[in-house]
Amino acid sequence: MKRQFVRVMRVSMWVAVLAFLILFARRVQWAETWQAFRSASPSLLLAAALVNLVSLALKGVRWWIFLRPVGADSLWLAMRATFAGAGLNNVLVANGGEAARVIFVSRATRVPSAKILATFALERLFELSGYVLMLVLGIWLLPLPDHISALRPFAITALATLGFFVLFLLSREKTEEPVTDATDWHGKLRAYSRRFTHTLASVSTVPRFTAAMLLSVGAWGLQIATYQMTARAVHFPITFTGTVAAVLAVNVGFLFRLTPGNVGVFQVVYALTASALGFDPNAAVAVAFLIQAQQILPVTAIGVALAPEFIRRRKHPASSGGESLPPLDSPLPSPADTK
């Protein structure tokens, strides 16, 4: 009964989102949007796409900083998993590529997935921290639209909470790695949790956190540059403040994607934000489509090219009649071991 209820709620949500997107699409003057497409500068679009790729590469370096201490010291592997995970996120709902890249790295390095998951949690923590810092600075320093400025209490609370959590991680005592010899599932779950929390504490240091925060600021700054360059490519006169507002608005729910790649929802939010600032929403739709084209097409192609086995393993359980992945707490076999 509970599973049926969840399924009904999920379908209802998708139907509601689809209906909203259709209503929005009917209000768009697609002739004006197409004209904006046709006027785009290919060289500026290419430059914006390259800047976006550099932003994603910084995220790969950020994860690598936390992976090195647990024995996964290959920067190339961290990059492959980051690009492949981003590629999967572009075709799956709810960021499904994130869980897959943890398994991929654990499988390739033979490091227990509890440790890899802990490093991934830290990487996501600093992705969120960079966003919240940008939100706080934007609200305080720029004349942002009311629907973003209204987030000031939330932004300050979130920044303070993240700050306290970071201090908590840094203050935790570095202890010996716990022994995990449980046989029942309760014991295995406790052992997994202990290994996860131990890794969080052992990897958390001031130099790593400082480097991760600087990389987060850089990655989000490059995202702003990508949006601004794309707008300039189609002669859309949005200001720097407008671009920052758009980046903040479209990424409010970056942990929860309602559609694959957030396609449709992204365009609606970007256009509404631009319209609130007095810009043409029809041209804004064109900008939003081009931004997503840069974020989806090259990233997905590069992810598949760098880690084709990542995609195959992600699909393997479904195509093999329900074969499941090995237990998450055990070292997974490397790709070479499966040949």
Image (cartoon, rainbow, N blue to C red):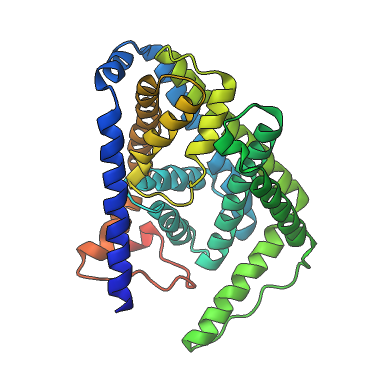
Residue 195 figure quarter = bottom right
* Camera-side residue of 177 and 173: 173
Q: Which residue is drawn at 52% across and 79% down?
A: 189
Q: Which residue lies furthest to the bottom in this view?
A: 184
Residue 180 figure quarter = bottom right
At which x and y percent is residue 154?
Answer: 64, 49
Q: In the picture shown, does residue 300 fall above or below 165? A: above
Q: Is residue 286 left or right of residue 30?
A: right
Q: In the picture shown, does residue 89 fall above or below 165? A: above
At which x and y percent is residue 276?
Answer: 49, 27
At which x and y percent is residue 54?
Answer: 51, 30
Q: Is residue 128 left or right of residue 337?
A: right
* Camera-side residue of 221 and 307: 221
Residue 114 figure quarter = bottom right
* Camera-side residue of 236 and 147: 147
Q: In the picture shown, does residue 84 fall above or below 269? A: below
Q: How many marks?
A: 0
Where is the N terminus found, in terms of image quarters? bottom left
Q: Which residue is drawn at 52% across and 44% down?
A: 252
Q: In this view, does 141 lie to the left or right of 74?
A: right
Where is the C terminus found, in terms of image quarters? bottom left
At which x and y percent is residue 333?
Answer: 40, 65
Q: In the picture shown, does residue 117 fall above or below 31? A: below
Q: Is residue 112 visible?
A: no
Q: Residue at x 70, y 63 (%)?
A: 202
